[in-house]
Image (tube, rainbow, N blue to C red):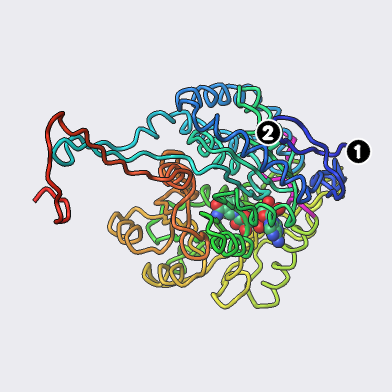
Amino acid sequence: MTVISHLIDGARVAGQGRTADVFNPATGQVSAQVGLADRAQVRAAIDAAQAAFPAWRRTPPAKRAQVMFRFKHLLEQNEARIAELISQEHGKTLEDAAGELKRGIENVEFASAAPEILKGEYSRNAGPNIDAWSEFQPLGVVAGITPFNFPAMVPLWMYPLAIACGNTFILKPSERDPSSTLLIAELLHEAGLPKGVLNVVHGDKEAVDALIEAPEVKALSFVGSTPIAEYIYREGAARGKRVQALGGAKNHAVLMPDADLDNAVSALMGAAYGSCGERCMAISVAVCVGDSIADALVDALVPQIGALKIGAGTTCGLDMGPLVTAAARDKVVGYIDDGVAAGARLVVDGRGHRVAGHEGGYFVGGTLFDRVTPDMRIYREEIFGPVLCIVRVDSLEAAMQLINDHEYGNGTCLFTRDGEAARLFCDEIEVGMVGVNVPLPVPVAYHSFGGWKRSLFGDLHAYGPDGVRFYTRRKAVTQRWPQRKSHEAAQFAFPSNG
Ligand code: NAD
């Protein structure tokens, strides 16, 4: 059985001690094992990153950018191989895996602009013969801890930009689907990254705690569930680290009576059931304004959910693969049971879905609930599976109140043809990422990604301009070169241009 290794100081390092099973979710078979780093292995990664920092910090940003250019090309050349690995361990379809890789590559492209991003700000003659500038210096060793659901994209939100800014990095990817993440990190080394600048340690809480507790680690980026995000934010901040911790979600789509129903239905199908609902931006609640749009939506969704092509993600042309683990499947099934017990109307039941030839796989079919109410667990909690809940309200204001009252505020979307309604929605909704007739409003790499409320802990969003600020420290320099032979008397009033 293959044991997936760490990548420390530019070399593969075998795990010592504890391991975890990695499954093929389409079959339920163990496909590999992954070493779970202990504190000594995390320490080796931190030492390597610290040793690499001084030279990498001094490397001109343009040279750092050249590594990113080469990395981008290698990622494109290896797209099929990476998508296959993602699909084998995560379960998502090949097309979906290729899509997440492409969105990750956008972040590499953004990082390739390092010389432009890091130009800083300059003011000549801020005072008499005084020039002033702000420059953005790297922090040192920084770390990222990433979830299973985007093993390529979410790490690529983090380390290309952190590294392009001159930091060195330790990545602790999800132990559930580590192979594509490791391959991608190796491609960055093939692109010319010096050893020690990026290190990958697989592991669980022990490795994460070692990163939190190490004083050399100056910043932590986390993406995962809200309880762990809160933990990492609290423990990291208590030790004086910068932390951005992105958590869970419950994303609502509001359908106005004037929505273009056909397009809204297509958008909802992809956003609710794509990747088996295992996306932090998945739409899991459709809020219908009025019974007539709700009835029409149910009628339109039922045949399409029934026609979903579900199978092993590695088969081309499917809509949906399995959930990532047996535990994830059982959790989703538990929520469906709970929704039925709470009195929601189960319109399409995905429990017990079987795929011929893959009887051991972790499949749940597309599921639809109608007449869900805000007190139900299936409404309040993140299910992270292919379950869409319809809530009926009688006005846009009531829909917005529902969303604003929810503890999560990651993404939301409004389907309408009414510009006034859309403007009100964008202005007043308490959610970090908003779509108008766009179901998955994931910002492009030159904006920044982040939710509000209990979907993000920290001040800055991920990647893009906020990512640059997160991974750098501002230094403001004020410089004066007095003219030769001039003498200026001491001034006791506070210096100003007044
Ligand atoms: P998770 O919280 O279980 O794991 C995330 C990371 O934390 C993994 O690397 C894991 O090894 C580590 N971890 C797990 N338990 C830990 C513990 N007790 N102490 C320290 N570290 C621990 O999340 P997941 O199941 O991998 O991913 C799904 C979750 O991530 C969902 O809640 C989803 O909404 C969220 N997510 C959020 C975003 C976002 O941008 N907001 C993006 C993707 C996923």
Name the front one of labels 1 and 2.
1
Q: Position of residue 334 (x, y in %)?
A: 74, 68
Q: Quadrant of residue 357?
A: top right
Question: Magenta: predominant secondary structure element?
Answer: loop
Q: Residue at x 41, y 28 (%)?
A: 115
Q: Position of residue 86 (x, y in %)?
A: 71, 38
Magenta segment: 313-325
User: What label sits on residue 189 in the rendered view?
Assistant: none
| 94 relative position to 131: left or right | right
User: What label sits on residue 1 in the rendered view?
Assistant: 1
Q: Residue at x 55, y 65 (%)?
A: 390
Judged from the image, the quadrant occupied by ligand 1 is: bottom right
Q: Residue at x 73, y 57 (%)?
A: 205
In depth, the one of 199 and 359 nearer the eye is 199
Tell me the SS state at disc 1: loop
Residue 336 painted magenta = no
Judging by the rendered image, the residue that carries numbered circle 2 is 83
Residue 314 painted magenta = yes
Contact (Cβ within 8 Å) of mark 1 with mark 2: no
Q: Position of residue 101 (x, y in %)?
A: 60, 35
Whichever of labels 1 and 2 marks the residue nearer the N terminus, that label is: 1
- Res 411 seen here: yes
